[in-house]
Amino acid sequence: MKMFLMAVIICSVVFGAEFPKNIESNKEIDKKVAKLLSKMTIEEKIGQMTQLTLQAVSSQEGTKNKKHIINEKALEEAIVKYHVGSILNVYNVAHSVEYWHELITKIQDIATKKTNNSIPVLYGIDAIHGATFTQNSTLFPQAISMAATWNKELERKAGEITAKEVRASGIPWNFYPGMDLGRQVLWPRFWETFGEDVFLTSTMGSEYIIGSQGENIAAPDKVATCLKHYVGYSFPMNGKDRSPAWISERMMREYFIPSFEAGIKAGAMTIMVNSAEVDGIPTHSDHHLLTDILRGELKFTGVVVSDWEDIKRLYTRDRVAESPSEAVKMAVMAGVDMSMVPYDYSFYTLLLELVQKKEVPEERINEAVSRILKVKMMLGLFENPYPEKNGASLVGTPESQAVNLQAAVESIVMVKNKNNVLPLKQGAKLLVTGPTSNLLSTLNGGWTFSWQGNEDALYPKSANTVLKALQSKFGADNVVYSEGTSIDKDINTNKTVEQAKNADAIVVCLGEAAYCETPGNFDDLELDASQLKLVDELSKLNKPIVLVMLEGRPRIIRKIVDKADAILVAMLPGMMGGDAIAKILSGEAAPSGKLPFSYPKYPAALYHYDHKPIEQRDDLKYDPQWKFGFGLSYTTFEYSNLKIDKNVISKSEDIKVTVNVKNTGKVEALESVQLYLCDLYGSVSRPVRQIKGFDKISLNPGETKEVSFTIHPDALSFIGRDNTRIIEEGEFVIYVDKLEQKFTLK
Ligand code: BGC
């Protein structure tokens, strides 16, 4: 009899809160903050609450054709005359580390040498899937793809590497991670989410925060994180960016608030506000969400920053304020500590007037400014506000790129592999086609060197598109390229079909162009007709077709699913995405990604996996194209021996679950083991299942590992009829793969 080593892997459904511990205790810092505050004038205080964009103090915006030029006079005016406490971003270009150092040094020189209290400026940036606006940075898969890895360790490393590269650029504050739940696939920021599930989002986001902030955010490789966008932004009813959400209090507490709560527990220092409105109340004016819940219940002690221009918009767009001054008063009194104004001094001037007229109490200003100063102190900016000299050498290192490649490989989800058409044989003649096959922007999406990410001219020449990566893996002579179609217009489909006649297999890369935020709004979830037609025409050749989907949201492809032999849902796998796809297609790596969302089959059937029993009727059953959690491998796994250590537990007892997983195929592979839970009866209807634990393991052919999970009773809780979190006695079922076990809570 063959003996296999049984490794035991333990994972818990409760993640530890590791609040950043600083050199000094919180109390010491509070004392220092109070002392500094007592020396500040009201003008200086309000300046601290003001955030400007770099463009506001520039004489020339940087773009792909133009160098950015700072306007030193305007910069000095901002910091000395208006006491501006924070600056953000850059627009449509990424700077070199050296240029960032020059900029940050200029800013901090003025702040620390030309002002009364020498308060350093807090520079913030959107480093969304890596240091977006720094040249040569490590650009990871976007959040939706990182979630598809189901790999906590990789997410933590992505946080660590991004923080190192952002801080190496001289910037101590990152407006990330996105904790918005991706439960609306039409939303153009869907790819900025970790998918549709509360637990997966909370876990991945927390890992990122812990990786980014570490134990001491003053360290030269750490930054302060910012949870976005509190709260409900990701669930617009009509699917469009910055449009109304209608979310009941129970739904808010059950689905949308928990990931932010997890982020707060993981130690996030700042939070950005939802740019739109919930239940008719623009969030920037929502005292209940921003103060009662965020401060009162979630105990958040950090800084609340507005989103871009959103305080003004309470007047100009939402019309809940009747004047710009009322808008400022509303937002500050609702709980916003810092205004991303970002182009002028209107916030400063209006807030000063409001305080002088006693319409906003100075205590509220003191509270906001104390929070801002505390973050600056915890970041160590008072000791050293300047960039570290060795910055450039820390960016895009081979070690970081190796982690990135691993993340990209693990992010790719194989959803179909008829007759094991994949992996493709070495020496096979390939025809590569489709609008996403030879661009880097379609692997990366928005927030890549520019806001929209669609400037291919800004991308590094050294990175591989899918085409280039396949040419280097299979030999340039074996790979023929033909465009086929652009995103929405036929280019040369007929010619492509002709060329494909000589190929052993056809690799068709479809999907979306890069976009970000509102410009990504669209009206049709189905993939563009010219792309569907390309596959349709090619399928008439009866050659194996491998479909690769590169997209920010799951575009409907039902009509071509049967025409493809293999399908990779690659979403936005980042700068190494081309190499990762080539590794998988060649069999150098086995796919291990699993969907973090339900891939819809029909535009009018958008369901979630954790739906309600009432949705299990035949007329509306959960029947997506591919289910949440689904993904194939080049091997097979057998699950057995699902055990729980108790059949009856009390509200204070944990339950330990173990299961054996065996690799029953022929290749080494990774598997994400997923544990689901169902609460059979509840006073509020309970989801048919919810993910409550997961762990990624590696198995050699024939190897078995025991995986173990600890379920804390908190995982059994839900929001009751009175809108508070409760745990009810009763029966629960645990599912792992096709196995199940029942237990009772008494
Ligand atoms: C986005 C935020 C971003 C901010 C600063 C806004 O338009 O909604 O996510 O952090 O701009 O760039």
Image (cartoon, rainbow, N blue to C red):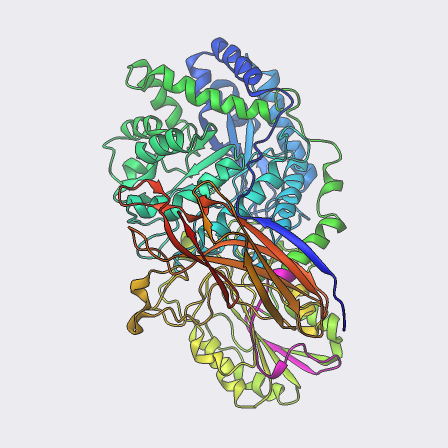
Is residue 415 found inside the magenta-colored segment of the image?
yes
Q: Position of residue 594 (x, y in %)?
A: 55, 63
Image quadrant in which the N terminus is located = bottom right
Foreground residue, 702 or 117? 702
Foreground residue, 584 or 132? 584
Q: How many marks?
A: 0
Occupied quadrant, residue 670:
bottom right
Q: Is residue 80 above or below residue 262?
A: above
In the image, what residue occupies the spot 54% across and 71% down?
435
Q: Is residue 315 above or below residue 708?
A: above
In the image, what residue occupies the spot 59% across and 31% down?
20
- Horizontal side of 526 relative to 263 (left or right) equals left
Residue furthest to the left:
322
Q: Is residue 396 above or below residue 506?
A: above
Is residue 63 found inside the magenta-colored segment of the image?
no
In the image, what residue occupies the spot 44% across and 34% down?
342
Q: Position of residue 236 (x, y in %)?
A: 34, 52
Q: Position of residue 46 (x, y in %)?
A: 42, 20
User: Over which residues does the magenta segment extend?
Assistant: 409-436
Occupied quadrant, residue 250:
top left
Residue 85 visible in the displayed image: yes
- Horizontal side of 565 relative to 298 (left or right) equals right
Residue 82 visible in the displayed image: no
Q: Position of residue 386 (x, y in %)?
A: 66, 27
